[in-house]
Image (cartoon, grey):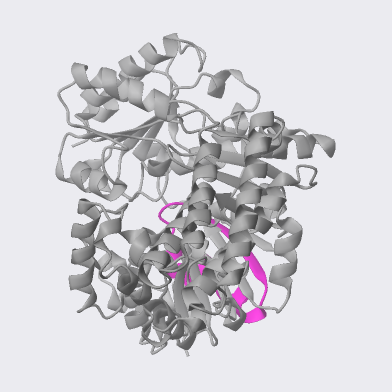
Amino acid sequence: MPSISHVFSADGALAKAIKGFVPRDAQTQMAEAVQSALDKKHCLIVEAGTGTGKTFAYLAPALKAKGKAIISTGTKNLQEQLYHRDLPLVKKALGSVRKTALLKGRSNYLCVHRLAQHGGNSTLLEKDILNQLSAVKTWSTTTKSGDMGELKTLPEDAKVLPLVTSTVDNCLGRDCPDYEDCYLVKARRKALDADVIVVNHHLFFADMALKDTGFGELIPEADAVIFDEAHQIPDIASDYFGEALSTRQIHDMAKDITLLFRTVLKDAGQLDKTADKCRIVAADLRLLFPETPQRGNWVEAMQREDVQGQVNRLADALGVLHEVCKLHIGRDKDLDNLYERVVEAREQLDAFRNTEQQGVSLWYETTHRHMVLHLTPLSIAAKFRRFISDPPRGWVFTSATLMVDEGFEHFQRRMGLEEATTLGLDSPFDYQQQAILCVPRYLPEPNSFKMRETLLDTAKTLIKASRGRCFLLFTSHAMLRQTAASLETQIDNPLLVQGTTTKQALLAEYLATENAVLMGTGAFWEGVDVRGSDLVCVMIDKLPFASPDDPLLQARIEDVKKRGANPFAAIQIPQAVITLKQGAGRLIRDPNDKGVLVICDNRLVTKPYAKTFLASLPDMRRTRSLDEVAAFLTDIE
C-alpha cells in the first residue's frame, strides 16, 4: 500500500486522478501528521494557512485508515461542499471503497409524524404557511432522504419548518408511531453503518452532550474525529455544555398542547387553558425588556422586582400545567412527551432562579418577540480534556486561524489540549508580490464621530480604484447600516448589503455582477471563498474586539481577574486576532490572486499590542498611502 506521502507526490494517486494537482510540501507534511495522529490515537492541532490544501490533507488519511472516522465542519454549506465535492474526488483518486454518509441536525429532516399532525388543521395556520405546507406535502411524496434542503422553493427561515421538523423537545423517539419511517432515524442508521461520516460542529456537540435524546450513539463508535474550522469549537462547545430556556420553547409547547386539545383530547379544556396561561406569562416576561434585541446579565436582571415577580409567576404557571398534564398521562403518546417537556422547562427555570452559582455565566438575549436565558460554563477545558482522553482515539483540530503570536497556547488552554502535538504550516502564497496591507494615514480614533466620514471617504476611494470587486467588512451592524445608507447615494456600483437577503443569495449576486460591492458583518468574515479578480480589495472598519458589554465576555473577564491574570491579554486580544485573520483570509485564495487589505484602525500603529496582530497576519507588503493602494488596484485586470 503506497505511503501517504506518495499519495500526494507528483506521480501519486491524487496527481493521476485530479487535473491540475500540484504537490505542496505543507499539504504532504499535514497529511503525514494527520496519519500519525490517527494511527497512534493521539491529538493533533494544525494551523494550515490558506492554500495549503488542508481538506485533502485530512481526507486522504481518513479514507486510508481503518475504523470509523467522523469529520466535523463549521457550517451546513461547508458540510455539503465537503461531502458532495471534495470527499468523492479523493475517494475516487484513492480507489477507496469505504462507505460515506452525510448527517445533519434533526431540524433539517422532515418529521412524518408532525406533518400528519398538521394535516387537517388549517384553522391554526396563516395563509402563507398553508401555501408552504402544501409545497412540503407534495415534496414529501417523492423524497428519499427527507432532507428539507432539497426543497429549494422554501426560504431558509420558512415559517412552516418548525411545524414539519422535530426538536429534541417534541420528538417522541422510539415511542413515535412513525419511528420506522423517520428520515432522521434512517439518516442516523446510514451514518452508523458508514466508515466516514460528515457532520457539523453543532450536531457533534449535541451528540456529545447527549442533548439529542435517544440518539447518543454516534460518537462512541468513532476511532477518529477530525474538526475542520476548529477555531469555532470553543464557543460552540460552551453552548452545548450549558443550558438554555426560551420563551419560544414555552410558546411552542403551549401551541402543541392546543393542537392536541383540538384534535385528540377534546375533553381536556383545562389543559388548553393552563398551557395558554404559561404562554401569556412567558410573553409578558419578554415585555419587561426593551423592544430592540439586546444581551444582558441575568443576575442583574433578577435584581429587578418586576422581573423576579414575573419569573415566579412563570414558575407557578408551569407548576399548574405540570399538575394538569399529570392527570392525562397515558392517554396519548404526544401528551406524555409534552409532560416530559413541562418537567424539563420547570427544572431549567429553577436553574435560572438560582443566581448564586459559581463557574458559570447567567445571561439573556432578546429577539423582537422572544427571550432566551443562557447558563454557560466559563471554561470547558476540564470537561473536554476528560472527554478526549477516554477511550483513546485519533483527534485532529485544524483551521487557517488557530495561532496567536506564533503559538497555539490560547486554543490549547480554552480546550484543555495542553498535551496535543501542534503544527503550524504557512500559506504557500507569495504575499509580498500578491498583496498589500494598508493602515491609512491620519485616521481618527476608532470610536470618534469623525470616523464615519473617514470610513465613507476611504470606501469611496477603494471602490473607485478597484471598480467595485470589493468586500467592506464591519464589526457592528450599526456602522454597516450607516455606511451603506451614505454610499447608496454617492456611488453608482451595485451595493449588496448583509441582511437584505440570505448569505448565499448575496454571494451569488456578487459573483454575477462584475462591479458589485458587498457589505457585511460577522457572517462574511469567514467561510466565504471568492477567487480571482472577482475580489481584489477587503476593507475592515476596525480591529474586531468583542463588544465589552457582552455579558458572557464580562463573566469570563471577571473569572480571569480572580485568577490574577490580565483578561485583555488572555481573552480579548487572542479572540480579536483570530477574527481579524479570518477577515483578512477572504482576500488571497489562489496563487494568482492579487489584492489589498485595508484596516481603518490607527491602533495597529499606535498600540503596543499592534505587533501581536501584525505578526499573526500574512506577510504582505505594507503601506500607509491610499494613493499607492489605488495605483496597485488600478493595475489589476
Q: Is residue 380 above or below residue 561?
A: below
Front-most of residues 630 and 103: 103
- Can residue 412 be seen here? yes
- In the rendered image, residue 352 lying in the magenta stretch gets the answer no
Return the x and y of residue 485 as percentages of the image width and height. Answer: 27, 21
Q: Is residue 591 above or below residue 608?
A: below
- Residue 389 horizontal side relative to residue 466, left or right: right
Quadrant housing residue 180 = bottom left
Front-most of residues 583 and 266: 266
Report the span colored magenta.
29-58
Quadrant housing residue 265 = bottom left
- In the rendered image, residue 55 lying in the magenta stretch gets the answer yes
Tally of marks: 0
Quadrant housing residue 517 = top left
- Residue 622 horizontal side relative to residue 382, left or right: left
- Residue 418 horizontal side relative to residue 541, left or right: right
Quadrant of the image for the C terminus? top left
| Residue drawn 23% across the image and 42% down it | 534
Front-most of residues 85 and 94: 85
- Residue 353 horizontal side relative to residue 405, left or right: right
- Can residue 61 be seen here? no
Return the x and y of residue 464 as percentages of the image width and height. Answer: 21, 23
Return the x and y of residue 88 as percentages of the image width and height. Answer: 32, 77
Return the x and y of residue 214 as percentages of the image width and height. Answer: 56, 78
| Residue drawn 73% across the image and 76% down it | 390
